[in-house]
Image (cartoon, rainbow, N blue to C red):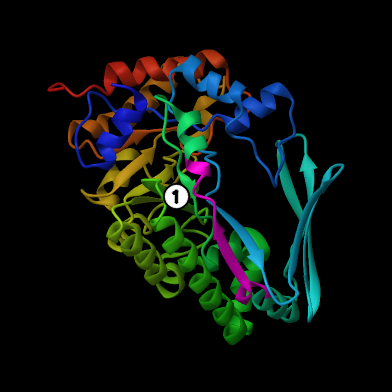
Amino acid sequence: MTERERLLCVLQGKTPDQVPWFGDLSHWYQAEAGIPWNLYQPDNAAPELLALHREVKAGWYIGAPGLHEEHYSDGVERERALQDDRAVEQFHTPIGSLQMIRRWNQTSYSWDIVKHLVETPQDLEILTYAQERKYYVPRFDNWAQAEKLAGDIGLGFCNLAYTGLGSLISYYMGVAPTIYALADEPERTERYIRIYNEKHLELVRLYSQSPAPHMIFTDNLSSDVQSPSLFRQYSLEHYRNIADCLHAAGKTVSAHIDGRMGGLLGLLADAGIDVADACTPAPSGDIGPAEIRRQAGPRMIVMGGVSPSKWLPETPEKEFIEHVRSWLDLSRTSSRVIQSAGDQVPPGTKLQRIRLMADLVAFFGRYPDN
């Protein structure tokens, strides 16, 4: 079976010949190539990157072309541009303008936020005004390009981006300012979350009519940031609405975690999410593979398995193998498991270690009856 066939098999509730291996190699590739990545037009589907996935026998799933265009009405404009080592995003509206500034960090190979878009209650009013006037135009023709890129090595996960609370915490405001805003300006903040989620559901409904079989959305969840109680209050119902809408259209959906999982996995399962993406076990994460499986329950697929530090040369190869094997051991009791990088393969990882993953999955992740 190809990696694509294995993944589709798991998404359909069946058992493939072995655990699928899908790695997000984009950050590693761009760092190795010395290419500062374009924050606003990331190319996770460059021919060289796809060739790398084929070389190391890893499935490709991050970077499918978007299936919509975002527009605004009533005089609202959104501008995003790279200016040397700065990435600047701006909203211009009849009631005011907003600006976010990010600066390129060569050490971490990422864009640091140095000025958030929302810093005052009035800023939040302006952003809410803009979100109310957002609308989407389908670009389903892009799916043919995604399928051509993926071929037999993968399946593009079409990205639905953030939900309301996630957009504030992970992008527009930051963690502490969002928590303070929920306490100090509850009406303004909750109104923004409600309006954003209503618009987000419009996008979900649009994608439910697309030819793509699987979607992903990302709040970069972490239980020390979006606590289970916070998630229940502001996100759980919206997650259920996303899953219900896509399931009604015969689609499946992933939620991107990217942090601590304790207390959140069960809520994702209750919401009907099909795949918990970027499950990062201890020591970087807070719980190990067995506990991840227990909290996720029997139905939800868990996708991840490697703590970032274990990829790096400082971790002996034997330790890396045992770490990966502990994740693949989950396949002994359920086929609802996918091997991935955790979140991403970090810069500094040796190519030999990335190549090794395919051999480990083939040896420890094979299902005996297939």
Q: Is residue 65 left or right of residue 253?
A: right
* 149 relative to 156, above or below: above
Where does the N terminus fall, quadrant-wise? top left
Residue farthest toward the left in the current orientation of the protein? 369
Query: Residue placed at 42% from the left, 20% from the top?
Result: 357
Residue farthest toward the front in the current orientation of the protein? 141
The image quadrant of residue 190 is bottom right
* 145 relative to 93, above or below: above
* 4 relative to 11, above or below: above
Residue 132 on the magenta span = yes
Where are the magenta residues, as a range? 130-143
* Callout 1 secondary element: strand
Q: Is residue 117 left or right of residue 255?
A: right
Task: Return the x and y of residue 291 as percentages of the image width and height.
Answer: 30, 45
Please state which of residues 149 and 108 is positioned toward the viewer in this rendering: 149
Label 1 environment density (alpha carbons within 10 Å; few <14, some 14–19, many ≥20): many
Q: Is residue 316 visible?
A: no
Q: Is residue 106 visible?
A: yes
Say which residue label 1 marks: 216
Query: Residue placed at 12% from the left, 23% from the top?
Result: 369
Please state which of residues 74 and 245 is positioned toward the viewer in this rendering: 74
Task: Return the x and y of residue 176 as percentages of the image width and height.
Answer: 64, 67
Q: Is residue 357 left or right of residue 250?
A: right
* 302 relative to 328, above or below: below
Task: Return the x and y of residue 182 as percentages of the image width and height.
Answer: 58, 78
Please state which of residues 124 and 206 is positioned toward the viewer in this rendering: 206
Q: Is residue 147 left or right of residue 241?
A: right
Q: Amino acid at mark 1?
A: Ile
Query: Residue placed at 34% from the left, 58% from the top?
Result: 246
The image quadrant of residue 334 is top left
